[in-house]
Image (spheres, rainbow, N blue to C red):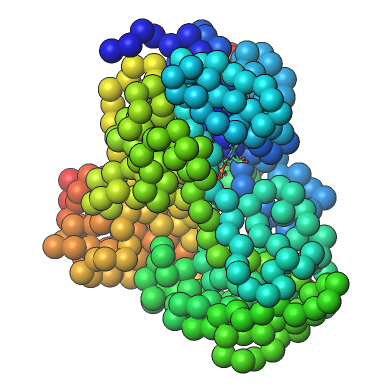
Amino acid sequence: MAFVKVCARDDVPEGEGIKLEQGPEPVALFNAEGEFYAIGDTCTHGDWSLSEGYMEECEVECTLHMAKFCIKTGRVTAPPATAPVKSYPVKLEGDDIWVDFDAGILPDGG
Amino acid sequence: MSAAPKSVAIIGANLAGGWAADTLRQKGFEGEIILIGEEPDPPYERPPLSKDLLLHPDEMPKTLFLHDLDYYAQQRIELRLGVRASRIDLRGKRVELADGGHVNADRIMLCTGGAARSLPVPGADLPQVHCLRSLADSRAIAAGLAPGKSVVVVGGGVIGLEVAASAARKGCAVSVLEAAPALMSRVVTPEIGQFLLQCHRAEGVDIRPGEGIAAILGESGVQAVDTGSGARIDADIVVLGVGIDPADDLARQAGIATDNGIIVDAHCRTSVAEVYAAGDVANQPNPYLGGRVRLENVQNAQNQGAAAAEAILGSTTAFEELPYFWTDQFDLNVQAAGDTRHAEQAITRGALESHAFSVFYLTQGKVQGVLTVNQPKDMAHGRRMIMRHLCPDPAALADPDSDLRQIVKAAS
Ligand SMILES: Cc1cc2nc3c(=O)[nH]c(=O)nc-3n(C[C@H](O)[C@H](O)[C@H](O)COP(=O)(O)OP(=O)(O)OC[C@H]3O[C@@H](n4cnc5c(N)ncnc54)[C@H](O)[C@@H]3O)c2cc1C
Ligand code: FES
């Protein structure tokens, strides 16, 4: 599989995330001032959706126990999580957003 | 200032100790790290002990342990588990262990947490009377929970109510005795205590505020409980959720200042140079609560442990975090931050009956506390309101359709 069209730009409000379920694992897609980033949606601490999280600058805070992840790389930036999530390639074509669900990668060294 | 440390001994291998050890390494400390713990397990999270692990004792929560044993080996963190530190020798810079061994270290960190209290009532030594602090306690309680069993929980605080909820979900007949007139009164307002009481009653839990325990009855096993007011309740198992005492005896014996825990400054330093403390055992000034406090929650243990590690490595940043905790009972996720109990005004956003609402606590217009029930994202906004000392428009806060992000922005 390669890139899949997932939604329109307008579907993701600025500063928020949405959950994508077209791939094998749920993915959270975030809009950071018009830049779009996709990372694994399931917090590695418990089972909470990061698309429901609180996004600030380039981090998303899990709203259950406040772990933070970098939305560009999937790296953990605050505990209690210790394991990273994957990041997925995103491309924009016109008003459409495409995500490659098969090309998720974990950050180097967690 | 003394020379940079070459070795750090951490006493107490749970959240504060575990995060402290990890942080020392992550921040580039190359010396020896020795993590000493009385429990047989490496650092683990206690929250599942009263929740998932009582409901599903055979399913390991995915992040029970902070790290697996291999991780500690890779990070050259020496684990000395299953052994109690019996004495601190300040002059000799060593920690003596109950097995006769000892550990030498330039710096000592006390992360000894707390021990669950027992009660001086007849019958408290019967085998089916449990406290809940460790994995072993949780397993023992879980083994006694089955449909139709009668469970008496003593204490309507966070742990008692979580056990009550889990036991009720397991099909047990559950009673809760709480000596105070309201539930969870150390951490929430009477109104929220009343809300929780109604939720528990609606789930069939027999909650008795203003009621103490007089005796636990039974010959070889628990049969009943006599309450302070003279009622008798059948019981197969009794769980005591009556708080913890800070494990500050080692510190006291060594002449380190204690007063409801080990006294530390904003850098987690005790009264004795080169000895630090963090977690449930540490009593530290907190700017948000306006005085010294000894907090008993995950976020504090984790982040204060990490802050103490950084202080050992020379950081001069004070640890001044906004206090925060959560509890899960039935389908309620309750989170609270800051001071929710002493505010002038409480603004409720959403209806209590919906089981999804938030309360913002204001004093002179300024948000000083936030409590959310099944509205975790409101907490993310609310915490920022407190940390940024904002005075948002109360009418806007109260409107569940308003956008909290906009409210934060408008008040900033
Ligand atoms: C059942 C339960 C549920 C909880 N749920 C929540 C929750 O939902 N949310 C929340 O925020 N908080 C919760 N908490 C609180 C949280 O778990 C504690 O705040 C946290 O564990 C404190 O960590 P700590 O490392 O400071 O101390 P502790 O967890 O008490 O650990 C201290 C460790 O030190 C060891 N020790 C003590 N003395 C010695 C010695 N002399 N030598 C060697 N080892 C020693 C002890 O054996 C222990 O392992 C819960 C606690 C319990 C018990
Ligand atoms: S589930 Fe995300 S921090 Fe705990």
Q: Position of residue B207 (x, y in %)?
A: 58, 81
* In-front residue for pair B66/B228: B228
State which quadrant residue A31 falls in.
Answer: top left
Question: Which quadrant of the figure contains the N terminus of chain B?
Answer: top left
In-image side of B115 versus A62 (left or right) = right
Residue at the bottom extreme, as displayed:
B230
Residue at 20 percent across and 48 percent down: it is: B389
Count of numbered circles on the image: 0
In-image side of B218 versus A27 (left or right) = right
In-image side of B237 versus B78 (left or right) = right
Q: Is residue B154 visible?
A: yes
Residue at 69 percent across and 89 percent down: it is: B232
Residue at the left extreme, as displayed:
B364
Q: Position of residue B52 (x, y in %)?
A: 69, 54
Image height of B132 relative to A74, above or below: below
Residue at the right extreme, as displayed:
B220
Q: Position of residue B221 (x, y in %)?
A: 83, 72
State which quadrant residue B62 falls in.
Answer: top right
Image height of B374 relative to A61, above or below: below
Residue at 68 percent across and 75 percent down: it is: B122
* In-front residue for pair B89/B409: B89
Residue at 60 percent across and 67 percent down: it is: B119
Q: Is residue B298 visible?
A: no
Q: Quadrant of ligand 1?
A: top right
Q: Position of residue B124 (x, y in %)?
A: 69, 69
* In-front residue for pair A84/A32: A84
* In-front residue for pair B251/B1: B251
